[in-house]
Structure formats: structure tokens, C-alpha cells
Amino acid sequence: MEKRGPGHNTAAELKNRRCIIDTVPGLVVEVDRSHTILLANKDAHDRWPSVVEGVTRFHELFFPGENIPEKCVVRRTLELERAQSAEIKTKDGGVFKVKTNYVPGIPGETPVKVVANIVDITDRVELEKQLEAVSRQHHDQLLQADKMISLGILASGMAHEINNPNNSIMLNVSVLQKAWNSVIPILNEFHRESGDLMVGGMKYERMKKKMPSLFSGMLESSKKIQRIVNDLKYFSGKDLISLKNPVDIESVVKSAISLTGNMIHKSTRHFKAVYEKNLPNVMGNFQNLEQVIINLVQNACQALENPGNGIFITITYDRNNREIVVSVKDEGVGIASGDLKYIQEPFFTSRRSSGGTGLGLYVSTKIISDHHGTIHFFSTPGEGTTVEVRLPALDQHAAGPALHGPGFPR
Ligand SMILES: Nc1ncnc2c1ncn2[C@@H]1O[C@H](COP(=O)(O)OP(=O)(O)O)[C@@H](O)[C@H]1O
Ligand SMILES: [Mg+2]
């Protein structure tokens, strides 16, 4: 019979224990008081081929070259003399679940030991993280979609509520303007006779000079509201329109320029629009395309820092790709490269404090894509921006008469 001494195992006993731990699922190691691995099962040897029984220490499996950590699970097991569990995270992202048990040993015969069962859960944790990210993203998307639907309903209601009173303001302003013009001769007469005529707390002479700009200011503001309402209507998707009319793009651009005339006039002394001759029509909706050009012109005007900078519009025909190309170029502040990817998103605006809604480019992009076209932005901060809209040209022979105004063949 083999002799046993304290802390020593007979070869037969070792073999027996190895047979047992080899059958245990997972990575199993036996560790002595000095944290040295006495025995490792086959799976543990496969997982850590560098393990040398009797030499390698437990913590070196996870933290090679380092000292025993303060919160080492083996240390805790030895101190508390009972089973412990822990999760070990390595520096390279590995995650291990460890369960230990305290083996008291037999005094004078077998030493105290710790048995540790280790499960590598790195892949599981990684998978869980990915699943969590996917589910968070999914949840965010649903929330976003939900928000957009609610916003659409809100926008459509608001557009409707604002549109009616705004229309009546627009109509009334022109009625008032006419009324004012017609009473001017009477007031002139009265003023000549009585001398000291006050109107609305202001001297008549002064008021008479101010009145035209008051009327045009009201009309401009009303038009601005109308443009916002139009963007809101398209945003909410309630503005069901036909996209099946042949449209003369030159008329679209001219009409947009005339509607934004005042704004252009105030923003720049250098405005030029050049149209190639005999342009083919495009298929679509006059008013919606006009809305796009108005949005682009408005953005161009707002980007200019002084009236010495210009705005240039061109319409050309790209024969190779059979596309009408509308380009709106400004010499304004430009778009920061970090902002370029956001400008077409709904509600993105760098002009929130000055009344920007962030809907203009979102709606314009939607309109152009509904027309099977494309819209691209080229911008150099400090130098300016060019927006290029491309629309498929209509086969001239196949098309009917083009629309030259909102719904009216010329
Ligand atoms: N021509 C331009 N020059 C500089 N920045 C522009 C131009 N056009 C658009 N942008 C940027 O894109 C943002 C979004 O534009 P838009 O959707 O029309 O919203 P809004 O005009 O209400 O801010 C603007 O706030 C601005 O930062
Ligand atoms: Mg805008």
C-alpha cells in the first residue's frame, strides 16, 4: 500500500479524482491554500493549454502576470470556509462565472482545497448585449414612429386651424389697402383744411408714408405663415395631391421667385436666374414643386450674411440622364460638415431662435422623392451652398399640355 503524507496525494488517488472531474461539465480546477492549481479537468486544459498543475495559480487563468486580486474568489472561499460564487471579467472582455466549494481536508492526511467550477459566458454576455441593443433600437424606432404619427395628426390639425384665419388675413389686407387708398384723397383734403390731422396717434403725413409698408409687412408675414402651413400639410401627409400633371419647371421657378420676391430683394443685390431654352416638362404637381423652390430660395436668403453676396438659380437639361436640373446656389454661411447629414431630418434647424421649423428640407426632400427625383447639397462653410434638384424629364411627345401655373394651362 502506498504511503500518504499530509498535503500529498497518491498517484492512484489523483487519477481517481481526475476521472471524476473530467466528467463534470465546464472547466474544473482544484486549488490549494497558496492558490496553486493542483488539478485541472480536460476541458480546463483545453481552454488554458498553458496550465501546469502544481505551478500555475488560479488568478493567472484570468490575470496573467498580476498579483492575486483583493477580491479573489478563492481567497474568499478559504477565508470564509464555505462555497462562493463570483463573476470574473478579464481585461480583454472575457466574462466567467465561477462557483467554488471549500474542501476541508482531513487533518494530517489530506490538505484543505478549493474546487472551482468555471463557465465561460463571454459569448452569452456579448449576445445578450447585442440583443439588448437591437431591442432598444427597435423600441426607439417604434417610439419614433409613434411620435411621428402623433406629430402628423397635430401638424395636420394645426395647419387646418391656421390656414383659414390666415387666408382671411391675406384677403382682408388687400381690401384694407384698397380702402385706405380710396380715403387718401378725402384725408388729404381734410388735412389741407384743418392742418393738424392725427391718425392712430400719429401725424397724418407720417402715417400716410408708413401705411404701404405696414400693409406689405402684414402680407409678407401672412405669406410666411402660409409657407409654414404648406410644409406642415405635406409633413402630415394630409395634402393628397395628384402627381400626374406635365409641369413646366421654368414656370414653377419663376412663380417661386415672384412669391419670394420681397425676401430676395431684402437679402441680396446679386440675384440671377438663368433658364436653358426648350426645356422638357416634368411629371408632377406644380404647387408642390413650387414649394420646394420656395424653401430652397428662402434658405438661401437666410444664409446670406450681407446683400453683397449673391443667389443664382439655373435650370438645365441633362440630356445623358434625361433629367431636369434645378440648381440654387448661394454665397452664404454654408453648412457645417457635421450638420450635412441632419439637415433633411424633420425638425432639424440651426435657426430655432429666429423662427426656423426644420421642416423645409424634410418636406422638400419628400416632395422630390415623390416625384422620383433626387436632391443633393454641396456646401463649403464660409463660402456658400449649392442645392441640386434633379427630376426625370418627361418624354415631350407622350405628354399633354404643360401646367404653367397652379392648375392652369397657360
Ligand atoms: N442654403 C443654406 N445655407 C446654409 N445652411 C442651410 C441652407 N439650407 C439649409 N441649411 C441648414 O439646414 C437647416 C434645415 O433647413 P430647413 O429644413 O429649411 O429648416 P429651417 O429653414 O426652418 O431651419 C437650416 O436650419 C440650416 O442650418
Ligand atoms: Mg428653411
Image: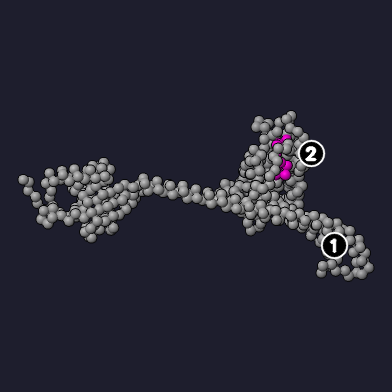
Task: Measure the C-alpha gap from mark 1 to mark 2.
Answer: 40 Å
User: What residue is disc 2 on?
Assistant: 409
The local secondary structure at tag 2 comes to: loop
Which range of residues does the magenta coloring cover?
281-290
Looking at the picture, the colour scheme in use is: one colour
Tell whether position 264 is magenta: no
Residue at image position (36%, 48%) is 93
Q: Secondary structure at mark 1?
A: helix
Q: Nearer the viewer, residue 329 or 99?
A: 99
- The image shows a total of numbered marks equal to 2
User: Where residue 169 sits in the image (x, y, percent)?
Assistant: 77, 57
Instruction: Give percent across and percent down for residue 9.
Output: 13, 48
Q: Looking at the picture, how far across and down is residue 150, in whole percent? A: 60, 53
| Residue shown at 76% from the left, 43% from the top | 406
- Give the residue displayed 63% in from the left and 52% down from the top: 153
- To which quarter of the image does residue 246 belong? top right
Amino acid type assigned to the residue bearing label 1 in the image: Lys
Residue 282 is one of the magenta-drawn residues: yes
Q: Is residue 320 above or below residue 228?
A: above
Q: Are marks 1 and 2 in contact (CB under 8 Å)?
A: no
| Quadrant housing the C terminus | top right
Q: Earlier in the sequence, mark 1 or mark 2?
A: 1
Classify residue 223 as left or right of residue 13. right
